[in-house]
Amino acid sequence: MTKAAARQDSSSAEEAQFHAVMQAAEDSGLLGEKSARIGGRISAALIERAKQRTGIKTNTDLIEFALANVALDDDFAKTLRKVAGSIDPSLKLGF
């Protein structure tokens, strides 16, 4: 696979993740009227790395995506720790 093809695949995955998170946020009623404003001083390096990792171009979209991720967090790690050891060790999982 060429670097350009790998970048395209990565870009498609990033775009799909962005759309999935934003759709889930909309479905949850989190993306109503945009009447609130947020501001703060943030490292330029942090912003650029987040944009590179997500493929998001604008600061507004980046902030909205980040907040949606936090708001929609399903506490997977916490839930996994809570159920640790609750599955019968003799259970055959097929792998």
Image (cartoon, helix red, strand yellow):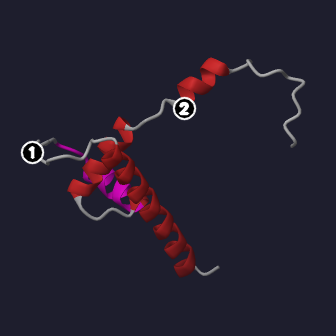
Distance from label 1 to label 2 (Cα)?
A: 31 Å
Range shown magenta: 41-52
**Mark 2 = which residue?**
76
Question: Would residue 33 be found to the left or right of residue 29 on screen?
Answer: left
**Label 2's element?**
helix
Q: Nearer the viewer, residue 78 or 39?
A: 78
Point 38% across, 43% down: residue:
69
Residue 44 x %, y %: 25, 53
Residue 66 x %, y %: 33, 46
Q: Nearer the viewer, residue 30 or 52?
A: 30
Residue 54 x %, y %: 40, 58
Residues packed near mark 1 inside 10 Å, few (<14), some (14 to 19) or many (20 plus)? few
Q: Nearer the viewer, residue 15 or 52?
A: 15
**Label 1's element?**
loop
The C terminus - image quarter: top right
Find out whether residue 37 is within the magenta segment. no
Residues packed near mark 2 inside 10 Å, few (<14), some (14 to 19) or many (20 plus)? few
Point 22% across, 56% down: residue:
59
**Mark 1 = which residue?**
35
Question: Would residue 83 be found to the left or right of residue 62 on screen?
Answer: right
- Magenta residues: mostly which secondary structure? helix
Relative to residue 59, is residue 86 depicted above or below?
Answer: above
Residue type for callout 1: Ser
Question: Would residue 37 be found to the left or right of residue 19 on screen?
Answer: left
- Number of labels in the image equals 2
In the picture, residue 14 is in which quadrant? bottom left
Point 47% across, 33% down: residue:
74
Q: Nearer the viewer, residue 17 or 55?
A: 17
